[in-house]
C-alpha cells in the first residue's frame, strides 16, 4: 500500500516516529494508502528548515520567486488528469468537478499569486511637502498554512501561493482526510528542485501537527481554513503569542429568491449552490428563502430537479454527486437529517443514505435532500451541516427575508435572486456576510477580498489582501 511522505528541507521523508494513519477512499469505504502520523518533532524539523531557508528566499528577486512558482503551476497543469483523478479518489468528489474546478483553480492560484507579487506596490504619504512617508512591506518569516478536506488542493494552494510569492517560508498541513494531492505537489517540488526548506509539508492529525504548527514560537503568521471551533482553538493559542492570524471558517449561507428573478437561471444555479461537491463547499447555500407568491412553484420544481440528480461513484461520468468525504462526516450529516425531522421538518426529497452495489457497497453516499416546514431559528437552520441538505422556507417581505438571512452566527456568503436593481443593492448592503452574489454563485475574481464576518472568520484572503497579510508593513518617515 502506498505510504505518503512528509516534505521537509527539500526531501520526501518518513515521519520521525515511523507511524502511519489510514487514508480512506470514501467511494468504497476502504483504506487505500497510509499517511504519516507526524508529531511536534516533525514540525520542529520543518520549522528549522524553513528558518534556515528564509534569508536567501526573502532576498531573492521577486521575479525569481515567481518563476519557480510558475514552474510548479505549469507542471501541475501538465499533470492535470493525474491530479484530478487522485483528488476524486481521495475526497469522493465527482471527477468532472476535480477536472473542471479543483485542479484548474489550483493552477490559477499559483499563477495568480506568482504574477500578483510582481505588481504589488506599497504606499507613500506625502506630508504637504514637509516630509514623505513610505511603507516597506517585508516578508514575515516562517508562516503556517492549515487547510481543510473539502477543496483539498484548491484551498491548499490558495494559501501557500501568496505566502511563498511574498517571500515567506512555509510549513503547511493539508487535512489528514485528504492529503494525497498535497503529497503529489511535494513530489513536483522535488522534481523542479524547489529550494530546500522554503516549502515544507507535514502530514498528520490536526490536534498533533496542526496545533504544533500554531504553537511553535517561530511561525509568525497562521493562515487557517476550517471549522469555527478549530478556528477558536487556534486563536486561543496564537493570540497571546501575537501571531498574525487569518481565519476562514464555517458558514450557513442564505439564498434569497424573489418572484421577479430570472427563473430558469435561478433554478439551475440554486441546484448547483445546494449540491455541488455534495454540498461540502463553505460557499454553498443551505437555507433557501423564497417569496411566498412563488413558493409552491419553486418547491415542486426544485424537488423534481433534486430528485433527478444522480448519486454515484466519483469516477463515473454521469455521477452528479459523489461520496461524502468520511464515515464520521457521513454520520454527522445523517444525524442532522434526523434532527430536522425531530424539529418538525418535512422531507420533500432525499433524506436517506444511498447504498450502491459492487466495489462501492461500503462507500458513504447520501441523497440530495430538501426539507421544508422548519422555523428559521431552529438548530437545523442555525448549525452548519456541510452536506447535500438544504431547507426551504417562504417569506412575505424583504424585511422578513433579511431577518432570516442574518439570523445565524455565521456570515460567510449570501445569494440573492432578483431583477430589481434597487432591491438588489439595498439588500446587499444590509446582509451581514463577507460576500454577496447577486444572480450568480461561485463567480470568483481572485483579486476580490474573500472571507466572512461574525463566526465565519477573521481577515480576508485574495488579491492584495493576501499579499498584505503575508507581509509586515514598516513605515519610514523622512523629514525634508
Ligand atoms: P477542521 O476545522 O476540522 O480542520 C481544518 C484543518 O485544521 C485540518 O487540516 C485539521 O486537521 C486542522 N486542525 C484540526 N484541529 C486543529 C488544531 N487544534 N490546531 C490546528 N489545526 C487543526 O475543518 P474540516 O477539515 O472539517 O473542514 C470543514 C470546515 O471548513 C467547515 O466548517 C467549512 O465551513 C470550513 N471551510 C471554510 C471555508 C472558508 O473559506 N471560510 C472554506 C472551506 C471550508 P485534521 O484534518 O487532521 O483534523
Image (tube, rainbow, N blue to C red):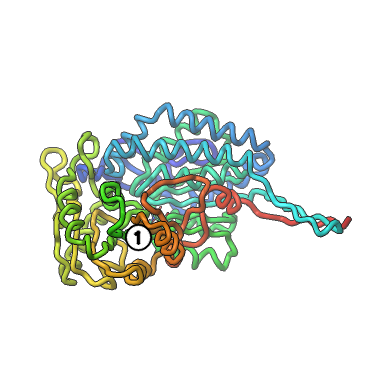
The residue that mark 1 highlights is: 253
Helix, strand or loop status at disc 1: strand
Q: Is residue 279 visible?
A: no
Q: Is residue 465 left or right of residue 407?
A: right
- The residue closer to the viewer here, 21 or 144, is 144
- The percent position of residue 440, horizontal first and vertical second, equals 37, 49
Image quarter (top left, top right, bottom left or bottom right) of the C terminus: bottom right
Furthest toward the right, the residue is: 480
Residue 347 visible in the snapshot: yes
Residue 426 image position (x, y, % from top left) = 44, 64
Residue that appears at 46% across and 52% down: 146
Q: Quadrant of the N terminus?
A: top left
As drawn, 74 above or below 467: above
- The structure residue drawn at horizontal position 21% and vertical position 61%, both measured from the top left corner, is 295
Residue 75, given in percent of the width and then of the height, sits at: 46, 28
Q: Is residue 44 above or below residue 72?
A: below
Q: Return the residue nearer the eye: 268 or 349.
A: 268
Amino acid at each position: 500500500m502506498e505510504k505518503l511522505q512528509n516534505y521537509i528541507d527539500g526531501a520526501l521523508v518518513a515521519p520521525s516516529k515511523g507511524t502511519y494513519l489510514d487514508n480512506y477512499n470514501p467511494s468504497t469505504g476502504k483504506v487505500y494508502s497510509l499517511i504519516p502520523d507526524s508529531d511536534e518533532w516533525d514540525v520542529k524539523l520543518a520549522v528549522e528548515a524553513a528558518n534556515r531557508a528564509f534569508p536567501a528566499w526573502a532576498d531573492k528577486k521577486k521575479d525569481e520567486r515567481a518563476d519557480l512558482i510558475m514552474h510548479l503551476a505549469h507542471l501541475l497543469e501538465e499533470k492535470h488528469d493525474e491530479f484530478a483523478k487522485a483528488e476524486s479518489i481521495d475526497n469522493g468528489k465527482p471527477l468532472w468537478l476535480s477536472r473542471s474546478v479543483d485542479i484548474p483553480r489550483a493552477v490559477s492560484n499559483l499563477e495568480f499569486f506568482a504574477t500578483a507579487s510582481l505588481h504589488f506596490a506599497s504606499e507613500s504619504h506625502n506630508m504637504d511637502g514637509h516630509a514623505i512617508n513610505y511603507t516597506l512591506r517585508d516578508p514575515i518569516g516562517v508562516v503556517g498554512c492549515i487547510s481543510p478536506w473539502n477543496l483539498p488542493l484548491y484551498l491548499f494552494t490558495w494559501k501557500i501561493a501568496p505566502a511563498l510569492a511574498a517571500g515567506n517560508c512555509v510549513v503547511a498541513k493539508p487535512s489528514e482526510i485528504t492529503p494525497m494531492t498535497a503529497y503529489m505537489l511535494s513530489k513536483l517540488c522535488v522534481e523542479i528542485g524547489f529550494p530546500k526548506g522554503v516549502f515544507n509539508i507535514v502530514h498528520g492529525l490536526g490536534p498533533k501537527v496542526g496545533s504544533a504548527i500554531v504553537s511553535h514560537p517561530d511561525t509568525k503568521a497562521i493562515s487557517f481554513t476550517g471549522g469555527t471551533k478549530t478556528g477558536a482553538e487556534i486563536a486561543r493559542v496564537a493570540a497571546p503569542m501575537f501571531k498574525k492570524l487569518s481565519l476562514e471558517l464555517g458558514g450557513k449561507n442564505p439564498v434569497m429568491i424573489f418572484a421577479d428573478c430570472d427563473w430558469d437561471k435561478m433554478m439551475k444555479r440554486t441546484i448547483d449552490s445546494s449540491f455541488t461537491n455534495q454540498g461540502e463547499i463553505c460557499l454553498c447555500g443551505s437555507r433557501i428563502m423564497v417569496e411566498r407568491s412563488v413558493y409552491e412553484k419553486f418547491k415542486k420544481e426544485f424537488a423534481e430537479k433534486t430528485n433527478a440528480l444522480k448519486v454515484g461513484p466519483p469516477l463515473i461520468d454521469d455521477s452528479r454527486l459523489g461520496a461524502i468525504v468520511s464515515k464520521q462526516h457521513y454520520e454527522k450529516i445523517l444525524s442532522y437529517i434526523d434532527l430536522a425531522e425531530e424539529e418538525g421538518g418535512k422531507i420533500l426529497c432525499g433524506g436517506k443514505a444511498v447504498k450502491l452495489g459492487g466495489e462501492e457497497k461500503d462507500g458513504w453516499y447520501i441523497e440530495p435532500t430538501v426539507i421544508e416546514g422548519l422555523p428559521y431559528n431552529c438548530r437545523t437552520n442555525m448549525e452548519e451541516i456541510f452536506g447535500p441538505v438544504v431547507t426551504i422556507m417562504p417569506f412575505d417581505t424583504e424585511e422578513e427575508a433579511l431577518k432570516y438571512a442574518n439570523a445565524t452566527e455565521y456570515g460567510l456568503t449570501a445569494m440573492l435572486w432578483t431583477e430589481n436593481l434597487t432591491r438588489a443593492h439595498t439588500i446587499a448592503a444590509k446582509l451581514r456576510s463577507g460576500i454577496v452574489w447577486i444572480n450568480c454563485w461561485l463567480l470568483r475574481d481572485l483579486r476580490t477580498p474573500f472571507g466572512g464576518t461574525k463566526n465565519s472568520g477573521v481577515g480576508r484572503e485574495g488579491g492584495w489582501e493576501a499579499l498584505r497579510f503575508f507581509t509586515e508593513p514598516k513605515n519610514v518617515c523622512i523629514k525634508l
